[in-house]
Amino acid sequence: MNILIFGPNGSGKGTQGAVVQKRFGMPHIETGVIFRENIKNGTELGKQAKEFIDKGELVPDKITIPMILSRIKAPDCQNGWLLDGFPRNLAQAEALWIALQKENIKLDYVIEIVLDREIAKKRIMGRRLCATDNNHPNNIYIDAIKPADKNGKNVCRVCGCEQLATRADDQDEAAIDKRHNIYYDTNTGTLAAVNFFRKLVKVLDVDGTPGVKEVSEALEKKLI
Ligand code: AMP
């Protein structure tokens, strides 16, 4: 099963992606995670990507497109993949589609988590990352996933880990606006990429406004 998942930053896309990954067992390939790992490990790719990520800009297509096209050819992707965070613009969508056609690879589903821009922004600023597992959802602005309290300190609501961090690019409002400008751009941005696929494959639209659980349930139903 080959799936793309779209959603603005703050829509819970990563969390819903993990639900899909669990259901079908394919690798969950998150472009942002790949970049952050490279930055952490001080690789050349990480150094190149960092200056763009810190400003809330896209890493150039000439770096990102080959990185992902080679990732989905890796042996663990033989039985499918879930791409999360790619494509992020129309050019990446077109490049991916051309590569898939060339290799005769079917794209089964495209998922779009639909969320209002202002709600998405608030959710980003409240997001807290658990050092034990980044997929443990914690958000100081969402009641259903508020971090737990331990002696007046916020700890991970799933595992109790005391290291809850914000991502530097999550607290910079200008950078968030820039990222959303890219996402909500229907001419050449991410929504243009989603619309590009609408003409080619089945796009499952899921309302991202309710809580994580409700969104997962709605998504599960659509995946049948
Ligand atoms: P994310 O974790 O998906 O929010 O991604 C964090 C940052 O990584 C983004 O703000 C971009 O700077 C960069 N990034 C992630 N995916 C892409 C992509 N497909 N193309 C270019 N840059 C990307």
Image (spheres, helix red, strand yellow):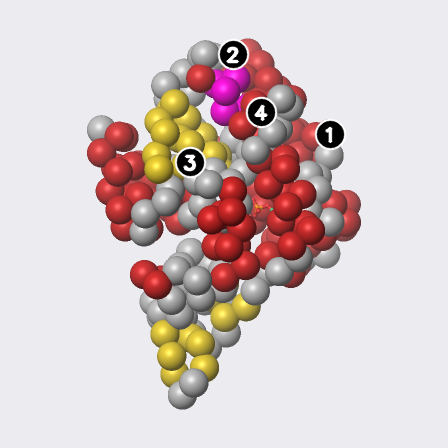
Q: Disc 2 residue type?
A: Gln
The mark that comes first in sequence, 3 or 4, is 3
* Residue 82 point in image, percent of width and height: 43, 35
Say whether marks 3 and 4 touch (CB < 8 Å): no
Q: Can residue 35 be seen in the rendering of this structure? A: no
The foreground one among 21 and 207 is: 207
Does ligand 1 reach within 8 Å of label 1's beta carbon?
Answer: no
Q: Is the Cβ of the residue at disc 3 closer than 8 Å to that at disc 1?
A: no
Q: Position of residue 40 (x, y in %)?
A: 66, 58
- Seen in the image, is 92 located left or right of residue 26? right
Q: Which residue is mark 4?
A: 186
Q: Earlier in the sequence, mark 4 or mark 1?
A: 1
**Residue at x-position 31% and y-position 43%:** 215
Which residue was labeled with disc 1? 62
Q: Earlier in the sequence, mark 3 or mark 2?
A: 2
Q: Residues within 10 Å of mark 2 (few under 14, many from 20)?
A: few
Q: Give the spatial CA distance, label 3 vs label 1.
A: 28 Å
Q: From mark 4 to mark 2, how far is it between C-alphas?
A: 24 Å
Q: Under tag 2, what secondary structure? A: helix
Instruction: Determine which residue is flagged by label 2.
Output: 101
Kindly check if marks 4 and 1 are in contact, taking CB atoms under 8 A apart as contact: no
- Residue 171 screen position, x and y as percent: 62, 60
Q: Which amino acid, by three-letter code, is at mark 3?
A: Val
Q: What is the distance, in whole Å, between disc 2 and disc 1 at their CAs?
A: 20 Å
Secondary structure under badge 1? helix
Which is more toward the observer, 186 or 222? Answer: 186
Q: Nearer the viewer, mark 4 or mark 1?
A: 4
Q: Which residue is identified by label 3? A: 114
Amino acid of disc 4: Thr
Magenta residues? 193-197
